[in-house]
Image (spheres, rainbow, N blue to C red):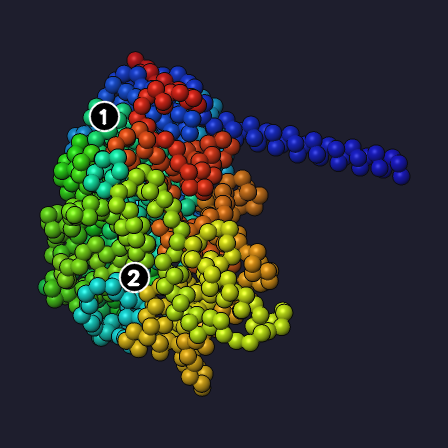
Amino acid sequence: MLRLFRWLTRITTGLVMLAIAATFLLYWFFSRSVPDYNEDLRVTGLSAPVQIVRDNANVPHIFGETDSDVYYGLGLAHAQDRLWQILLLRRTAQGRLSELFGQRTVSTDRLLRRLDLYPLAVRSVAAQDDYTMSALRSYAAGVNAWLREVNEGARGRGAPEFWLFEPNIALWQPADSLAIGKLMALNLTENIQREVLRANMSRILPDARLADILPDTPGAAVAALPEYASLFDAPLPAFANLEPAPHDPLSPVKARGLAGASNAWAATPARSAAGSTLLANDPHLELTAPSIWYLARLELETGGVIGGTFPGAPVVLVGRSDALGWGLTNSYADDQDVYIEKVNPDNSEQVLAPDGWKTLRSRQSIININDADPIRLTLRWSDNGPILEGKQFGLSAITPAGHVASVAWTALSDTDTSLQSLLKIMRAQNIDEALVAGEDFVATSQNLTVVDRENVAMKVIGALPRRAARHQTQGRMPSPGWLPENHWQGMMSYAANPEIRPTDGGIVGNTNNKIIDRPFPLHVSFEWGDTQRVQRWQRLMQTREVHTRESFIEAQLDTVSVTARTLLPLVARDLWFTGEAAAEGTIERQRRRALDLLAEWNGEMNEHLPEPLIYAAWMRALQDRLIRDEIGPFSADFQRPEPVFLERVFRDIDGASAWCDVIQSAPVETCSDLSRLALDDAILWIEERYGPALESLRWGDAHEATHDHTVLGDVGWISWLVNIRQSTSGGDQTLQRAMTRGNGPDPFQNVHGAGYRGVYDFADPDSSVFIISTGQSGHPLSRHYDDLGELWRRGEYIPMTLNPDLARAGAVGITTLTPAN
């Protein structure tokens, strides 16, 4: 027995030692790709030496004798820190994910091939001016210089992910950067989803109720649209045949409500305490690890610029120079239209055009799939745009038999000069130069907020389609593609894009709210990204006569929900302080506790409070009870509370209280009945998930920010290494926007927010500040993988200085690039 015990001990010890050795071996292999920032590298393609000084937050400050050399340095820095990220973005744009991930990403590849984004980017290279081409070539050379270092210098394949996936990497090309720009345009738009949803809702709801659940942004009324089914002779598919596709984190197409959003506001010297302009900007995108954003400073011939870049592109998208500050917010312009094309019953390669049957343009494409046979696709285009598959965007539900769907989109341009525009804005020396530069921007449309030391302006940049006044659906729903009145009539002139310069008020800003009310067809959009945050922003701007950097930061981090302050008095008006005493442990007693807590709450969505969780769960349960019997399976498209809808119902605007009656039941339910039942639903859900002690709940426990790795984020123990989770404040409609997931077992997780924040003070430019949501490195073993994340969570910032001495002070490393020749 003793002998057996000894052998078991030896075997166990051996296995433990083997596991420890294997762990150290894996760590050694993976850590080889963590770059050493104190290096002297001899590289090809430079005209003179370049220095990359990484300050104590690992923000690279890049110094060179020419702009081309500086862009070279940025390409190398991006590749050092985010190699996997930029190569995955390129592969996504090319529609080649399935070569790595197999069947999982076939549907994404099929969509990207049909949209043809990468070939369009290749053709757009010829449209760039000389400066942009120089920047693109130099940036590509910088990326490729690091790829050569990886291949020749035993640097762990460049990123730990390449130990798990195919490490063969093609050299970076100028078109790759343009393709990433088009991919981000796809990420920022959701017009197709909106058109399909409106078409579906119009089939099951009367006009009055459609106006409740999909309301126009408050403002001038819009003329009624035709019933969708009446536009076509052929019958539409039955809803029972619908099979919604699951969302994949690798897909660039986001669910409704999770496309781009943002905040930006600026003050003139008259409204600034220090006597110069102020600008705050926080673009809202999907939270990922690493962040979509990467901070960098470029020392160009026109002066230094610093701010947020996208790895893969040679430009500071948002930031400041000594002369200028600029920010971007999504304009929500209606720059996509879905068309239903009638197929020739005698020739499936033809669709009906205004002048008769017309043959589709076509091209063959092959998708190679890991561990499966390749798929051959026939890509087709009508005059309106690429033909999409019915299972993409749920188009099969609104496409009649004998028809196919196509899409027109401003980003489907082979002369796309958006990057050229951004490079010009980045180098502009005053507002007028920046606004002129905006004319080259194509897609997806943005609001450019820009300040110099004396002036402030905001302008919509990006191509806006010109539609005919006779357009059948005004671009709000899919329309027959064979009728000339539904076709785009070119683009509006850039001069017609809205432009705002503050007058007496001295402040201009945008929270994705409605910025102009022009009648169709001169409109920008019918549906905007915000009707709530703007109310809080207006109050914060108007409560001070003058503003400071600190007051702009305070507004950027504000977590008070105007929506909660508006809805709670309406939803709970018949429940406050009513009812008799109830026994401990009953739902009535818990309901009273919840109402007592909410009665004293000021609407602040603070992570440490219980009230935000009770409120959020209540509104979610209430909306579900209101809509489920009317729209059935489509209720899955409305899993986040829609504030305007709930307010319409409880104010009974145009008879909207009809939603409160449950159709399937004999009694006529009131809105108070559903409000009480929904609160009980919410309490039961909270008790099952967090326990019965309502007073000890924390919003932050449910509202964790999920910075997940797009590929490894759901892979067993690896997820604990690569994912970053943080308790956070804010909510769907707060200025510190922290959009909730809306579905699944954790519907209140924070999945979409301000991955970049910047506040620029031109009274003292070097006192400007910025931050990103994770860290600069994309390597999980780097100390810079998440070092900025905790600052971001707490609402703190790092200095945004162009002073080279401050950058060098406490630098984590200086990389010197020397021409090999």
Q: Name the residue: 19% across, 48% down.
A: 505
Tag 2 residue: 194
- Mark 1 is surrounded, within 10 Å at the Cα level, by few (under 14), some (14 to 19) or many (20 or more) other residues, namely some
C-alpha separation, residue under disc 1 versus residue under disc 2: 43 Å
In contact (CB < 8 Å): disc 1 and disc 2: no
Residue type pointed to by label 1: Gly
Q: Name the residue: 30% across, 13% down.
A: 821
Q: Position of residue 782 (x, y in %)?
A: 49, 31
| Position of the N terminus by quadrant | top right
Q: Name the residue: 45% across, 38% down.
A: 791
Corner quadrant of residue 121: top left
Q: Position of residue 684 (x, y in %)?
A: 55, 67
Q: Position of residue 410 (x, y in %)?
A: 20, 50
> Could you say which is closer to the camera, residue 284 or residue 764?
764
Q: Name the residue: 15% across, 50% down.
A: 497
| Sequence-wise first label, 1 or 2 | 2
Vertical side of 142 occupied by 567: above or below? below
Residue 120 in sight in this render:
no
Q: Secondary structure at mark 1?
A: strand
> Could you say which is closer to the camera, residue 529 or residue 39?
529
Residue type pointed to by label 2: Arg
For residue 303, which numbered disc appears in the image?
A: 1
- Mark 2 is surrounded, within 10 Å at the Cα level, by few (under 14), some (14 to 19) or many (20 or more) other residues, namely some
Corner quadrant of residue 602: bottom left
Which of labels 1 and 2 is toward the front?
1
> Could you say which is closer to the camera, residue 511 or residue 740?
511
> Could you say which is closer to the camera, residue 526 or residue 632?
526
Q: Secondary structure at mark 2?
A: helix
Residue 698 in sight in this render:
yes
Vertical side of 454 occupied by 498: above or below? below
For residue 432, which numbered disc appears in the image?
A: none
Q: Position of residue 75 (x, y in %)?
A: 33, 29
